Amino acid sequence: MKFNKLTPNLSVKNVAESVKFYQEILGFKLEMAVPDGTTRIENKILENIEYASAMVKKDEVYLMFLNEHNFKCDIPFLQEFTQGASVLFYIDVEDIKEVYLQLENRVEIVKALETTWYGMQEFYIRDCNNYIMGFGEKA
C-alpha cells in the first residue's frame, strides 16, 4: 500500500478570500479553481464570481478549499459540524525564524515562536477561516 500525498479539504465561507489569504500571506500558488454551479476548471480567481472549490500548493503542501454549502451537500454527514472545529494543521518548514518574522505582523499569532520540550521550534497562527496552522522546525 502506497500513499502519495495528503490534501486536507477545508470547508470555507468564501473560496476566493481563502485563496487570497493563502497566496498573499503564506505564498501558496493557485493550482485550480471551479466556479460554483459548473464543472469548469480554471487557473485563476476572478472578482465577483463565487467558487465551489479551489486547490492551492506551496512546495509539497496542498490544500483544497470547498465552499461550505457545497461541502455539506456533497458530504451530508458533515452538516452538523462547524467550520474550523477540532482540527489543526502542522507544516514542517525550513528557517522557522524567517517564517515567523514574515508572518508575525500579518496574521494573528495564537502561540508565539518557542522551542518545545520535544525538540521543535514552532508557532501557530489563525487563518481567515478560523483554522489553526502550526509551523515547526527541528531545533
Image (cartoon, rainbow, N blue to C red):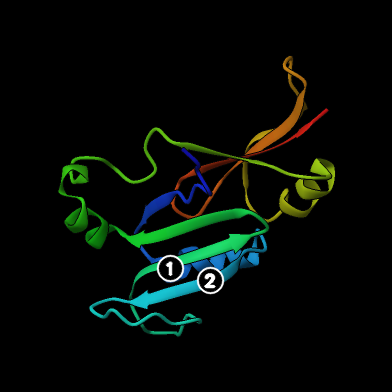
Image check: 115 left or right of 85? right
- In terms of secondary structure, where does tag 1 sit? strand
Q: Which image quadrant is residue 134 in?
A: top right
Look at 84% across and 44% down and name the residue there.
Answer: 95
Kind of residue at badge 1? Ala
Residue 99: image x %, image y %? 77, 49
Image check: 109 left or right of 36? right
- In terms of secondary structure, where does tag 2 sit? strand
Q: CA distance from mark 1 to mark 2?
A: 7 Å
Quarter placement of the C terminus: top right
The residue under label 1 is 54
Sequence order check: which comes first, mark 1 or mark 2?
2
Q: How many marks?
A: 2
Look at 75% across and 26% down and name the residue there.
Answer: 120
Residue 71: image x %, image y %? 26, 56
Give residue 1's mark: none
- Residues marked 1 and 2 touching at CB (< 8 Å): yes
Residue at the outermost front position: 1
Kind of residue at badge 2? Glu
Residue 14: image x %, image y %? 38, 65
Q: Mark 1, residues whose alpha carbon is within 10 Å: few (<14), some, or many (≥20)? A: many
Q: Is residue 19 above or below residue 133?
A: below
Look at 58% across and 62% down and name the residue there.
Answer: 57
Work out whether residue 25 or residue 92 is closer to the camera in this orientation and state it: 92
Q: Mark 2, residues whose alpha carbon is within 10 Å: few (<14), some, or many (≥20)? A: some
Q: Is residue 125 above or below residue 14?
A: above
Look at 37% across and 57% down and name the residue there.
Answer: 12
Q: Which image quadrant is residue 66 in?
A: bottom left
The residue under label 2 is 31
Q: Is residue 125 above or below residue 86?
A: below
**Foreground label between 1 and 2:** 2
Image check: 82 left or right of 47? left
